[in-house]
Image: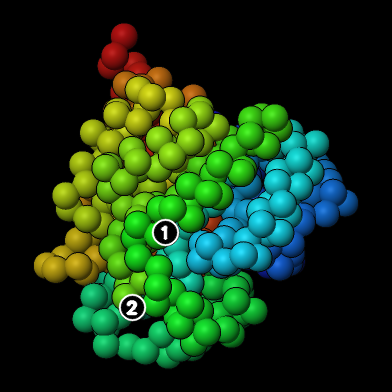
Amino acid sequence: MKMTFRWFGSNDDTVTLEQIRQIPGVTGVVGALYDVPVGEVWPVEKIKKLKEEVESHGLELEIIESVNVHEDIKLGLPSRDRYIENYKQTLINLSKFGIKVVCYNFMPVFDWTRSDLAKRLPDGSTALSYEDKVVKEIQPDKLVEEMEKGSKNLSLPGWEPERLQQLKGLFDLYKDVDEEKLFENLGYFLEKIIPTAEACDIKMAIHPDDPPWGIFGLPRIVNNKENLERIINLVDSPYNGLTLCSGCLGANVNNNIPEIIRYFGSKERIHFAHVRNIKIHEGRNFDESSHLSSDGSLDLFEIMKAYHDIDFKGYLRPDHGRMIWGENARPGYGLYDRALGIAYINGLWEAIGKSAK
């Protein structure tokens, strides 16, 4: 595996490249251009500048998270073809700088959703949390306000203000989009995109829905083994693959993460791995926890063993971390707990590898 660390750029991240390069085992960062509006072409000059900045600190930039999909594509509107052409050109531009994987999602309106960005845990740390009753009772526009308040004046990936300003109009448009229609629109997108991805040697890796169930009446389709299988079969190409996030899929107790890893790993369709743990409570409620197996509901040993069993050589990063030791950072994306997560994951990987000999 290739250990990576998500970074939001020198102008919008409390974590520096100099700090990232000191984390044992990290070879590269997962980056993006966050100042380019969704749907527009990523300029070559900006990609080049990002690449050079990362490499100047002895790190690699080979994976992008995310080139976001414009809402018109998800809705299947006539205007989608223009945005798909822009997406294809972005892939072409990224390929000029050695990008190998692009992570994206197909979640309508909202990206990842939480009811609390800083829930106090028993050990005194704070973490992202999801309480189903709160989400069901809150109005979408109020949720947006709460997310903005808890963002610590840092951008939240997937919660772009210019998109969410059109909230009511988006909900009106999605009234006629159910799961089957969303699958159809995803298939249309992939049929157009994958030939370009193949030509550019860039593997597309769709991210699971977070949480893996519908919210606010919006359809969600990237949430279980059966739907992941259906997605990779929409366009049968090794360039149509997955970002396998243990925390997203694991929130549904019916999803067996090690089994899912082995199944799609045997098909060589896992191009990017997000590894994190969550503590599941009764109902659809969960808190994000440290990576340690005993702190959460997921067995990180079995998850990493599954990756070892499939001889995973792709990119992996620790996903969200808690806020610990007084750190003040973007919710879920501080330095300390994610670095601890890397140390734990690397320790598991080494131990599994040596015990297998």
Query: In this view of the protein, which residue sits in the foreground, 237 or 178?
Result: 178
Q: Is residue 20 above or below residue 323?
A: above
Residue 113 position, x and y percent, is: 39, 70
Residue 86 position, x and y percent, is: 73, 54
Q: What element carries label 1?
A: helix
Q: Determine the residue positioned at 31% across, 46% down.
A: 227
Q: Determine the residue positioned at 29% across, 29% down.
A: 263
Label at residue 209? none
CA–CA distance in space, label 2 to label 1: 16 Å
Say left or right for 65 vs 45.
left
Query: In this view of the protein, which residue sits in the foreground, 103 or 289?
Result: 103
The residue type indicated by label 1 comes to Leu
Mark whose residue sits in front, 2 or 1: 1
Say left or right for 8 vs 48.
left
**Residue corresponding to mark 2:** 216
Q: Which quadrant holds residue 81?
A: bottom right
Quick one: which residue is furthest to the front in this view?
78
**Residue corresponding to mark 1:** 182
How many tags in the picture?
2
Q: Which quadrant holds residue 134?
A: bottom left
Query: In this view of the protein, which residue sits in the foreground, 325 or 302?
Result: 302
Regarding residue 121, the answer to whether it shows in the image is yes
Quick one: which residue is furthest to the right in this view?
45
Regarding residue 58, the answer to whether it shows in the image is no
Q: Is mark 2 on a helix, strand or loop?
A: loop
Q: Determine the residue positioned at 19% across, 67% down.
A: 284
